[in-house]
Image: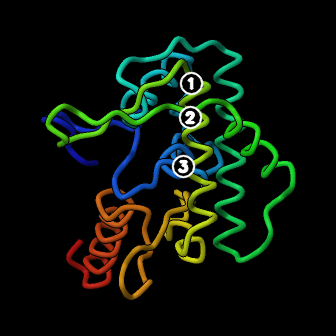
Amino acid sequence: MGDEGGRRRTKADFRFDDARLCFGFAGTLADRGKAAPFERLARPDDLGRWCVESGCTGAPPACTEADLVRAKELREAIQRVGEAMAAGVAPGSGDVAAINRAAAEPSSVPELSADAASVRWSGDGVGAVLSTVARDLIALCGSEYRTRVRICGNPDCGVPFVDTSRAGARRWCSMKTCGALAKKRAYRARLRADGTG
């Protein structure tokens, strides 16, 4: 686990390391490869917290149970479209329709800070944030990176990511999480094989 602001990261913490916004959102369901995935969006407040921590808004929007259901539906559509892109196949029409519906809502608006050193997003509620997330996936689909979508090599993870490495050989959604875990597992396996672990 990594370190966030001087504290140890927990399973409930959102992951943004090396992630495109849309796939960071897909990662709100952790451990997709396990029998019991871990839900990071368990309550409406969690969705509001993700909206802020993702940088999509400065204050948590009011979120209802209905917003949470809608967000999870979008998240799973993004996950399945990411999987289809990684496999080089056409995504399901229902998933495309769900993403287009979310993107049709007015999105958050980027605002440049007075010193032009940072950008923050502002919008009217969770619908604007979900629109921004959906539009990020649409922008990816229209870019040269659409053929560089991969699925994390950690079988427990399963989150899509964009491989921006020069060689196109990145295996993990993030070296800080899944990559570090894979290195740790390989190290322990070597110790056991050597009889020292």
Image quadrant for the C terminus?
Answer: bottom left
- Residue type for callout 2: Glu
Residue at image point 56% right, 69% down: 143
Labelled pair 3, 1 in contact (Cβ < 8 Å): no
Residue 153: image location, x then y, percent: 50, 71
Left or right position of 83 against 194 = right
- In this rendering, is residue 64 above or below 53? above
- Disc 3/disc 1 C-alpha distance (Å): 19 Å
Mark number, residue 39: 2
Residue 60: image location, x then y, percent: 43, 17
- Residue type for callout 3: Cys
Residue at image point 76% right, 38% down: 101
Q: Single out the residue that lies furthest toward the bottom.
A: 167
Residue 45: image location, x then y, percent: 49, 16
**Which element type, helix, strand or loop, lies under badge 3?**
helix
**Which element type, helix, strand or loop, lies under badge 2?**
strand
Along the polypeptide, which appears first: circle 2 or circle 3?
A: 3
- Residue type for callout 1: Ala
Q: Nearer the viewer, mark 2 or mark 3?
A: 3
Residue at image point 22% right, 37% down: 8
Left or right position of 98 against 60 = right
Residue corresponding to mark 3: 22
Q: Nearer the viewer, mark 3 or mark 1?
A: 3
- Disc 1/disc 2 C-alpha distance (Å): 6 Å
Residue corresponding to mark 1: 42
- Disc 2/disc 3 C-alpha distance (Å): 17 Å
How many circles with numbers are drawn on the protein? Answer: 3
Residue at image point 24% right, 48% down: 2
